[in-house]
Image (cartoon, helix red, strand yellow):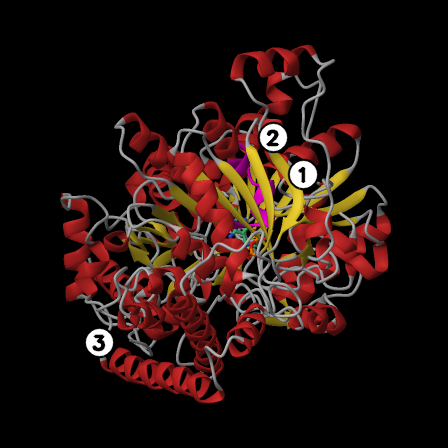
């Protein structure tokens, strides 16, 4: 099996689906000739031409609005938003239109897009090249939200997202675009949506995370193991609709929970996960669930490694929760 | 957009901008608003190819002033070049500069009156320094240290300079445009004599904010000068793919606004055009869209390699129209400049920059607690809690 990084695996999935289905088109800023600012669409313009890999004018509202129209016509657009931080000029189209088409037309119209966009910090990007806005989309009924953490999942989840009947926001953690490497099967396969993955089994405590922080959670879990604490680490993979069964099953076993995410703490997905745990398995809890997250400030530049919930902040949370 | 328009700033092109009188709406608007907006697609030039000024358009600046502005252009260029080196050495994280666009920035900022405000994009550090921001503060911003006016919160080149009547840079494209309009409009309501200058690239003319800003400014006759630096490229997207109109200036027509084109590599032309636009705005004639024809000689930023999408030949062609080279030729011809003076400005700038870099590198990172300041005017309980948690917790490894 070939070794790939995240960028190559996503590129492989796009190429595969574009060969398989001539309705698939890519559109966005700099996605064509130059292959995207992170080179995720590299080579696709040469293979599929400028009608299917389209450099658009600089307008996210234009990109998403037009993609919705293309989808209504029957194409399968995969728009790219250059950075998740720049998705907001398209927020109206996503929230008011994309998310509600099926519902508001009584199922008559469906606008099926996969919006790919790099998210997250750790690349010295300051406020506007670092944010993790997932909960701002999860809170809108009608959008699926996916976030892979390794090349295998990235390819399989992207293919599943493209073939899923609903609109999907596909957040790519850019901090690990090139750092996360692994074997990726050639050819077609999917990783089903809404199935979390237990990336480290353990019995004392459950750590739930996604995106680039999964590696920090694993690092902290490995350090905790040296202290005799076996943490189970769950990679959500699909953030919405969430795989509640895997979470509840784990919490019933461990009784202790730490949720880790880069996005600011308040109103983040972590809070929702803990509320669900309270609703579904409160009586199994042996310690108050804990969040280790970004702070409720804009994403900083110089102090970004202090802002991020890296292993050095996760480990004490694990140790304290295990000892509670 | 034809290549000749994009590449040949010498090329002039005229179109009638008078609204067709057969159109009911146009006729009505003509009657209601008086004169039709004046839109010209001739490329306004002053500095001719032979290094002399066109007497018909010469803004008649004092020699000393011109020399000063040229010095600013050279300083801007030297700083740009050195910052790229610092980025390559890993000493700063990023730089986005104005190589090749110095005349658009220095010429326009110099034409602004002291009371006029600047709402920048991200390539206008030259304007900020011209307005009096100490070089040290700019360099501190490049390092994101404790003395950085934005307190290390934003990427390099995201500066702020209220004291210099200069806005706060943010990354999202176009957002400054509507804000500049609102600011100018408010001043007009208060009968204050000021205009706003807002900078953006031609890519930004595709953004929502450009269209909203143009419309509001024209409807409310806000004294805003829209400075579109048409540098040929929005990262890898050429101007020809950004818009189907022949020029960016003509976008003014639809909004009922004045639009003009100007050789952006000609400091005199930029100065005269912007000075005239400000005078009109101050006289209550409303906003102007100025398309400044220039070229981004460098990559989009230090993160970009332009070889992946544009031909060296195109770049070489534009190097012949380098605004710094053209100015220098003019000054030398007039006996106002010499090799020696050139070497002196370059050396002075280099030395000043080196000293600033040294000081910036010796300045500590912003304090941990400063991360929680300025989110709100007063820190609410939850941020106090988070701050205290950070302070008593373990430190991250490997930086600041
Ligand atoms: C809303 C938004 N979308 C995308 C980006 C990423 N981006 C940064 S600069 C740029 C190109 C800008 O081109 P232009 O407006 O022509 O200005 P120039 O950089 O050429 O001066 C893009 C796409 C952004 N900063 N903001």
Answer with the quarter of the image where residue A4 lies: bottom right
Q: Do marks 1 and 3 share a chain?
A: no
User: Above or below — where is B107 with respect to B216?
Assistant: below
Local SS, label 1 = loop
What's drawn in magenta, residue-wise?
Answer: B200-211
User: How far apart are the alpha carbons under marks 1 and 3?
Assistant: 46 Å
Q: Answer yes or no: is residue B173 visible.
A: no
**With B265 as the anchor, is A8 left or right in this view?**
right
**With A40 as the anchor, is B63 left or right in this view?**
left
Q: Nearer the viewer, residue A178 or A233?
A: A178
Local SS, label 3 = loop
**With B91 as the anchor, is A238 left or right in this view?**
right
Q: Are marks 2 and 1 in contact (CB under 8 Å)?
A: yes
* Coordinates of residue B111 in the picture (x, y in percent): 41, 52
Of the two numbered discs 2 and 1 on the same chain, state the one appearing first in sequence: 2
Chain designation of label 1? A
Chain designation of label 3? B
Answer with the quarter of the image where residue A23 lies: top right
The residue at which mark 2 appears reads as A98
What number is the disc on residue B364?
3
């Amino acid at each position: 099996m070939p070794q790939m990084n995240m960028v190559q695996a996503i590129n492989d999935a796009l190429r595969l689906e574009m060969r398989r289905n001539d309705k698939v088109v890519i559109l966005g800023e700099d996605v064509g000739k130059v292959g995207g600012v992170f080179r995720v669409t590299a080579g696709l313009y040469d293979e599929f031409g400028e009608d299917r890999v389209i450099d658009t004018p600089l307008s996210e509202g234009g990109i998403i609005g037009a993609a919705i129209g293309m989808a209504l016509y029957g194409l399968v657009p995969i728009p790219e938003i250059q950075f998740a931080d720049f998705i907001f000029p398209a927020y109206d189209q996503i929230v008011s239109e994309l998310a509600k088409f099926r519902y508001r037309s009584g199922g008559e119209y469906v606008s099926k897009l996969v919006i790919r966009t790099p998210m997250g910090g750790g690349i010295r990007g300051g406020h506007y090249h670092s944010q993790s806005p997932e909960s701002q989309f999860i809170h809108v009924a009608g959008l699926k939200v996916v976030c892979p953490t390794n090349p295998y999942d990235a390819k399989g989840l992207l293919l599943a997202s493209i073939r899923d009947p609903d609109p999907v926001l596909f957040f790519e953690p850019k901090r690990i675009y090139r750092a996360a490497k692994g074997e990726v099967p050639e050819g077609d396969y999917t990783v089903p949506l809404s199935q979390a993955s237990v990336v480290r089994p353990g019995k004392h405590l459950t750590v739930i995370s996604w995106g680039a922080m999964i590696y920090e959670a694993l690092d902290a879990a490995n350090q905790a193991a040296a202290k005799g604490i076996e943490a189970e680490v769950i990679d959500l993979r699909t953030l919405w609709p969430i795989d509640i069964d895997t979470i509840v099953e784990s919490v019933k076993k461990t009784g202790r929970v730490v949720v880790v995410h880069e996005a600011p703490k308040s109103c983040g997905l972590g809070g929702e996960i803990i509320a669900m745990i309270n609703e579904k398995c409160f009586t199994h809890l042996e310690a108050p669930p804990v969040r280790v997250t970004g702070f409720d400030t804009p994403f900083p530049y110089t102090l970004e490694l202090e802002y991020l919930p890296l292993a050095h902040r996760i480990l004490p949370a694990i140790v304290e929760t295990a000892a509670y | 957009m034809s290549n000749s328009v994009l590449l040949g700033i010498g090329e002039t092109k005229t179109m009638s901008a008078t609204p067709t009188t057969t159109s009911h709406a146009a006729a009505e608007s003509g009657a209601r608003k008086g004169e039709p907006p004046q839109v010209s697609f001739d490329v306004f030039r002053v500095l001719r190819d032979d290094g002399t000024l066109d007497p018909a358009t010469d803004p008649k600046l004092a020699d000393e002033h011109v020399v000063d502005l040229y010095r600013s252009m050279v300083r801007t260029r030297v700083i740009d070049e050195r910052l790229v080196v610092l980025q390559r050495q890993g000493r700063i994280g990023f730089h986005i500069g104005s190589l090749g666009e110095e005349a658009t920035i220095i010429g326009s900022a110099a034409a602004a009156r002291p009371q006029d405000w600047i709402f920048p994009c991200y390539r206008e550090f030259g304007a900020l320094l011209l307005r009096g921001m100490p070089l040290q503060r700019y360099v501190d911003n490049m390092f994101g240290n404790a003395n950085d006016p934005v307190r290390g919160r934003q990427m390099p080149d995201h500066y702020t300079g209220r004291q210099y009547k200069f806005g706060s840079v943010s990354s999202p494209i176009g957002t400054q445009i509507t804000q500049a309009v609102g600011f100018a409009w408010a001043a007009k309501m208060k009968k204050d004599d000021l205009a706003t200058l807002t900078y953006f690239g031609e890519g930004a003319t595709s953004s929502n904010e450009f269209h909203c800003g143009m419309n509001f400014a024209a409807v409310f006759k806000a004294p805003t000068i829209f400075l579109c630096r048409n540098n040929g490229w929005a990262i890898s997207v050429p101007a020809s793919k950004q818009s189907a109109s022949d020029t960016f200036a003509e976008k003014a027509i639809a909004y009922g606004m004045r639009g003009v084109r100007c050789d952006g590599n000609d400091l005199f032309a930029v100065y005269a055009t912007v000075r005239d636009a400000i005078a009109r705005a101050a006289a209550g004639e409303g906003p102007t869209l100025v398309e400044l024809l220039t070229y981004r000689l460098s990559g989009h930023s230090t993160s970009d390699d332009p070889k992946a999408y544009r031909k060296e030949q195109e770049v070489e062609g534009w190097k012949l129209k380098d605004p710094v080279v053209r100015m220098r030729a003019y000054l030398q011809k007039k006996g106002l400049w010499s090799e020696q003076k050139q070497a002196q400005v370059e050396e002075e700038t280099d030395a000043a920059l080196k000293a600033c870099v040294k000081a910036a590198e010796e300045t500590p990172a912003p304090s941990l607690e400063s991360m929680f300041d300025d989110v709100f005017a007063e820190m609410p309980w939850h941020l106090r809690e988070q701050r205290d948690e950070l302070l008593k917790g373990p430190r991250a490894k490997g930086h600041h």
